[in-house]
Amino acid sequence: MRDASKIIIILALLPMIMAVMAMLTVSKPYVIPVLFPLIIIIIALGLSGKPMIRLSLGISKDVMYVGDELNIELNVHVHGGIGLLVIRAPPSPGSLMAEGFEVTSGNNVHVIFKGFSDVSRRFEYTLRAVRRGIYRLDSAEYTYYHVFGIHEPIKGSISLEKAIQVIPRIKIVRRVLGIVKPRQGLPRYPPSRLGPYSTEFKSVRNYVPGDPYKFINWKATARSTGNNLMVNEYEREGLRTAIILLDTGWWMRYGTSEENPLEYGISFILSLGRVLLRYGYNIGLWTMPMGPRVMPSSGMTQYYRLLGALISVRSLPIKGYAMDVSLYRVIRDTNPVLIAVTNINKESVGRLGEIISRLPTRALVIDVAPDTILMRSMLRNIPCNQWVIRDRRRLYGVIPRNAKVITWDPVCEGIGSVIARASTYIGRWL
Amino acid sequence: MKQILAILSLALPLIPPIILLPSNVLLGSIVIILTASLGLVGLLMNRLAIESWASLILSLIISIVSQGYIPYILHTLLAQIWDPALFNGSIVVIEYSLVSSQLYENYVKYMRELSSRGYDKTEVNNALDNLVKWIMALLTMALAISLAFYYVITMVTIPLVDPFTALVVFAVTYIVISRYVVMRIKSS
């Protein structure tokens, strides 16, 4: 829009040229080409007032599921000034929100011409959430260009404090036929070792990472000869524990930004977690190589803890795994079933096998295969004949014997079916 | 409005050479052909201002060699103009076309840029059309005021002011206005 200033510069030069011409030709009519540009400049200067721009944004909801639509209303009021106003409402290009939403109707960018009278406009547009996450609206930006470019474009923005929470879609599994419910026969460990902490004191021992701080026994710590941090240990309530291990390695991004092993894995974890919590399990969550963790607990509050942790998980360009020490302690204490959600590939299988072999528990590996997701974008009507599994069998040979692998092709198989298959093992092991 | 801008930018620069035709057919025809050809080239290159600039430069050259001090010093008229007052006054339409051609170029440029950035084409068109309408209205108003001024000047003559004094008075006024404009552009 700097080209508008070019017009003014040309208009400013013309009178001088014409004045010289008028003098050399001694011609009175040259007064007209002298005056014309000058009058335009004077008019432009008279209209050079800066506008007062007010933008406001309203959203229909701030918590939604992936795939839901969000209606946004943008109100613009301009007072003063004459020129073009270019507005860009969220999502801004390159922002996190732009990755998580797509415009389905209307437009978030607008151009308005402001004449002498005030302008009040209302724009509506609809966004569809394509990825889970917590998205800040950030700001709505505008740029005002004067009609003759008499001053520099005025850029401004209004800061929007609102945030939108996009929750992954989950499959509500009402009933899993008699398999998930822990067997009432003789457990291999007394139930008192498995559930959350009770108030019944058991012993004092050295602190290990993962112990709640509230259990630190300060008096015992002060008496400790080796300056060791001591904690009280309490008896456990009688619940079974399942620990979910989510791989956040780079290979979890294979596929599209909306459909990849990580997104499907998160939906699976939340759906399975909901089922297990309903059946009275303790559920814990760890991410590897790094990321949030949720210590095992039960009840619907725990479901929201899992949701809160998983909503902002991103896959990282880190190869290899580094395990959390507290996970070993929790596994040793609670003898849980370990459910690892990953996308097994040549790069990751070695380290994954090594980690599982070091964990003193049985593990269930949910291998989310992205092959069909990738193929679907190229071919139509891909047959679901488990051709992807055949390629992966060689890799499964590296996984230790204490682990069972369930291959999940999310394009061909629903979450409910995978949960049913997983719960067969969970029920058998616990 | 884009079409109107294009027509104005292409047609207006031809008016001074057309005025030249009755007095000097050959020169007028050459200038018309040259200006029109440049206009077509400019249309293809999306640089319509070329025609206006060419017409302005040629008209000024013809004007300067056909009247005033240069023919007086050389004792000969290098070009004959049938109605010098009309010809000189018609240069204002070239100025008008200069602005409209710049507007046309900006219109096309903004249309392309904004459409490629996801702005609604109809909305951009409407906004730019309104912008052009306003500018054209202001230009026409400025032209009308200039003509009115000229009429007043021709009616009320000030015999004491010779051309050089008038130029000095104008130059001082012009410098003051120009400095103010530059200051405004820089300070904003």
Image (cartoon, rainbow, N blue to C red):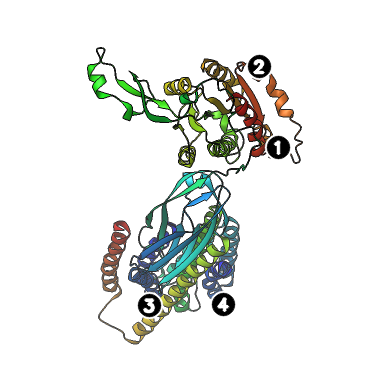
Any mark on residue A412, and which? 1
Residue identifier under label 3: A28
The crowding category of the residue bearing disc 4, from other C-alpha atoms within 10 Å (few below 14, some 14 to 19, many at least 20), is some
Badge 1 or badge 2: first in the primary sequence: 2
Q: Are marks 2 and 4 on the same chain?
A: no
Per the image, the residue denoted by label 4 is B22
Q: Kindly indicate whether the residues beneath marks 1 and 2 are on one polypeptide chain.
A: yes
In contact (CB < 8 Å): disc 1 and disc 2 = no
Give the percent coordinates (x, y) of residue A2: 42, 56
Q: Are marks 3 and 4 in contact (CB under 8 Å)?
A: no
Using the rendered image of the protein, determine whether residue A240 is visible from the camera's viewpoint.
Answer: yes
What residue would you read off at disc 2? A397
Tags 3 and 4 both on a single chain: no
Q: Classify residue B186 as left or right of residue B145.
A: left
Please identify, in this view, whether the residue under mark 1 or under mark 4 is nearer the observer: 1
Q: How many marks are shown on the rendered structure? A: 4
Where is residue A410 shown, x and y percent of the image?
66, 36
**Residues beneath discs 3 and 1 located on the same chain:** yes
Q: Residue furthest bottom?
A: B155
Q: Of circles 3 and 4, which is in front?
A: 3
Q: Does A308 appear above or below A160?
A: above
- Residue under the point 51% across and 78% down: B82
Q: Chain of mark 1?
A: A
